Every structure is written in C-alpha cells, then in structure tokens.
Amino acid sequence: MTHQAPKGTRDFYPADMAVRRHIESAWRGASVRHGFDEIDGPTFEHLDLYTVKSGEGIVSELFSFRRAGGENDYALRPEFTPTLARMVAARGAALPVPTKWFAVPNFFRAERPQRGRLREFFQWNVDLLGVDTPGADAEVIATAISALEALGLRAGDVTVKLSHRGAVAGALRGVGVPDEQLGAAFALLDRRDKLPPEEFAKRAAALGAKGDLGGAIAKLARATAPVSSGLDALAADVGVPAAELGALEFLRDALRAAGIEEWCQWDCGIVRGLAYYTGVVFEIHAAGERAVAGGGRYDGLVELFGGPRTPAVGFGMGDVVLGNLLRDKGLLPTDGTELLPKPDVFVVAANDAASAQLPGIVSDLRRAGLHVRHSYKSTRNVGKLLGEAGKSRARFAVILGDGLAAGTVDLKDLASGDQRSVSLTELPTLLLAVSPIRAVGF
RNA sequence: GCGACCGUAGCUCAGUUGGCAGAGCGCCAGGUUGUGGUCCUGGAUGUCGCGGGUUCGAGCCCCGUCGGUCGCCCCA
C-alpha cells in the first residue's frame, strides 16, 4: 500500500458509515424532539475568527493555510462556537427568542491522536440563545441525555457532572479569595490534579492571605453530591453556608422539573477551561473515558463577536469518545453492516428468459419505492442465488422462472422459508403493504 | 512538541540463525436442468507501509520516513 490516510483521520467503509449514521440519527432525533433546528457553516473560516477568542497560541493546534498566490489566512474549523457566534451576530436582533439551533459538523485539530481523540471528528453542537433561565439550561442538558438514552445508555452508565461559575465564585469568596483573584482561582481549580501538591499550595497561598486556601480549594474540587440529595450536604463539604450556592438551587429545581435529576451530580471540580462560561458548566462522563460532552452558559460570547448581548447555553458531544463508550457497553453491533438498510426484496432469475426480463421488473419495483437488489452472477443455480439473497439480508426473494410466461413469480419469505406464487402485477402493492416504514432522506 | 510499543493477503495472524512468502476466516468459480447461510473440490490473493543502507542473498539486521495503538502536553 503506497498511499495511507493522513494521521488521525478515518475511512468510513459501509459498516463504519452505518455506525456513524446510527449515532448521528440519535443526535438529530433528540435535537428535533426538543425543538432545535439544524444549521451548518463553512468547513473553513478566516484564521482570525479563532485567534480573536483564543489568542495566537491556538494557531499551532489548527490546520491553517493560505491559497497559493492568495493573501488571506484560513483555518479548517476546530470547533463550532465561533461560527455560531458569527452567524448569530450577523442576524442580530432579527432572530426569534428563543433561537434553538443544532449542528453535526466535522472538525479538525492538529493534535497527536490517542484514545478518544482524532484529528478529524464529528461533534454534535446544541445551543439555545436568548433565554437566561435555569429552565433553558435544563432543556439543553435534557437534549443531550435524550440522545444518550436513544443509544441505549442509562443513568448508571454516564453522569452529568454540573457546577456553576456563580456558585463556585460564591464558595471561593466564602473561603477568602478576593474578587480580583477569582479568575486565577478558577484556573487553579481546573489544574488541581496536574500540579504537584507543593506547587498547588504555593499558588493557592498567593491568591489571598486568609488561612489554608490551598486546602479549601482542594476540598472544593473534591466536593460532589447527587443533585437529588439537596444542597446542605454539598455546602457542608465545601465548607460554606448553603446560601452561597443559591444558583444551584434554581438549577436543581429545573433539572427536577425536566425529569433528569437522577442523571446529574454536583461536582464543584468541573470548571471547563474556557474563560467565557458565565453560569452553569457541565461535563458528561463515563468511567475510564474522556468527557463524552461538555458545555455551559456563555452569556457574553455573542457580544464578543460583535452582536447584541445574548444569553446562551449549549454543549458539544463528540463521536469518538461516544463511539468508544457505546462499543464498551455492548451497544453497537460487532459488525456494523447489521445497521445498514435491509433490502425489501432480492430478485433472482432462474432461466435465460427470466434473466432478460429482470431489469424491467427490478426497475418497476424500485419505481414503486422499494429497496431492491439483484444478482450480477450469470449462474442459473437457484440455490446459489438464494444464498446471495440471504446474505443481502433481504426480507423477501422474488424468483423469476417458468411461471413468468403466465405472469406469475414466486415470492419467498427469507426468514420463514414460506413461498407462494403471486401475480407480477400485484407484486409491488403486496411488498409495499408488508414493508416497514422506510427512512426517507436520512 | 515529547515518549513507549507496533506495521506480512480484505480480516486475524504465523514466518526458525538472514536462504523459494504461509495458515485460518472471508472472497470468486464449479459440484446440481429451480430452492438459501451447512458441506465438498478448485482458484485468486501481496510493492512484507514507504525509501535508503549492510550482505552473495533482507519480511528478518541498521538508518530515515509515513501510518497505527497508548501515555505526557493540550483539550475550544
């Protein structure tokens, strides 16, 4: 093999494509059920769309390019949020409230591939704009859960870990972090497991003068509790009065009202790297995997991209980690071809005269809307032809043979083996009547 | 950007000290004048990832490179 696919990319053979469509269908289904409309943007954008938000340092993580002889720098999209913010800003006040959009784009990142991370991947993005209530937060999270549930996952398989920038800020103030050091404290909270203990303690001490700040932040990072168990226990764990966690109380009520409380867990260690989150932040985790999804509220971002101040909440869910998780849980077939559409009927010809009429008959059945396949073999061995029909996973075989002169064919149910002679003219109606509802447009 | 291990048929892999490139599965054809996933017989698999070096001779040893897996970094 002289040519290899570029590092970190995937070839989607039919079985792989079927798995991808299976996941994407769950995403689209959940989106539509929750009232979101699908959008998309360009696969590449002006490079500065990404440097504006993330700084020049992001460039080394991008696939960026300049057309030969051109003067503009572009980058393959590494995420959707800048495109979304650009699209929202461009329509400004003309958009309805709320605006509920979703997308299933591919993204490109110039990173070293490893488990759960590739250079090209698909990510479901769901965003609800124009509403700043905890109910909107809960609806977005419920949409994510709905897709996971459709794929066969249950509350015990994954956990939605939630925190709230406002509540954590309250807790940090409660342990003595001054307001101007809150940003640095968030960053420290996020890096709690990556720093050596002494370095962590040193940086924590630099944030304020009061007491054992390092111990307090470490305690905050470890504070978890089921959403259903109430806030008092969590507040006690964190070491602050429950009143400081007021933002969580409204969120808890909204999650409960949405019926997804049992999927959710408070986790004050969830910070998310991005500075632009302003309220709830959450990640969906499964044991032993990278985060399946992550998101939160970003009420200031659209304004940053030149639009009106627009409250917004959303998340992204990638196909790579989710695929790993589904495989490990036995929720994907070993052979993805099982997910491919099954033919309604497989047509075989038992003699030369029948063979001559086969193309016309196949064409008529297809025109009627049926999924029809046929053999390309020259053999008249009906046994072999039926073997091929069985392998195609067709529901029925139609055998064109001696009865054709009298206008009849043999219709065989490939699962039961039952077979009967039917008239050719009534064949399409007969097959349509027993065929399952077909996916249209996918 | 750093590190470890790996790359032989479509797939899973074997290949002895450097000496004719193999097996199973799958695929194709026949066994059979029209009834299926089994069975029997036969057939095709290939730039041993790619390039260079050492050698009489390289799948095997050496160097480089591309790709894979898994960590670190990063994680929008």
Image (tube, grey):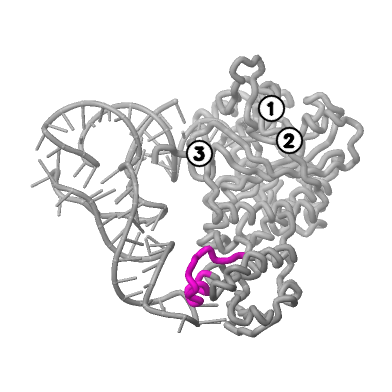
Snapshot quadrant of residue A229: bottom right
Q: Earlier in the sequence, mark 1 or mark 3?
A: 3
Q: Is residue A319 magenta?
A: no
Q: Secondary structure at mark 3?
A: loop
Name the mark on residue A41: 2
Across and down, in percent, residue A344 comes to 65, 69
Residues at marks 3 and 2, common chain?
Answer: yes
The residue tagged 3 is A8
Label 2 – label 1 distance at C-alpha: 9 Å
In which chain is the residue bearing label 3?
A
Name the mark on residue A45: 1
Query: Which residue is nearer to you in this view: A73 or A258?
Result: A73
* Image label count: 3
- Magenta residues, start to end: A373-388
Callout 3 amino acid: Gly
Q: Dot 1, crowdedness within 10 Å: few (<14), some or many (≥20)?
A: some
Q: Is residue A387 magenta?
A: yes
Q: Dot 3, crowdedness within 10 Å: few (<14), some or many (≥20)?
A: some
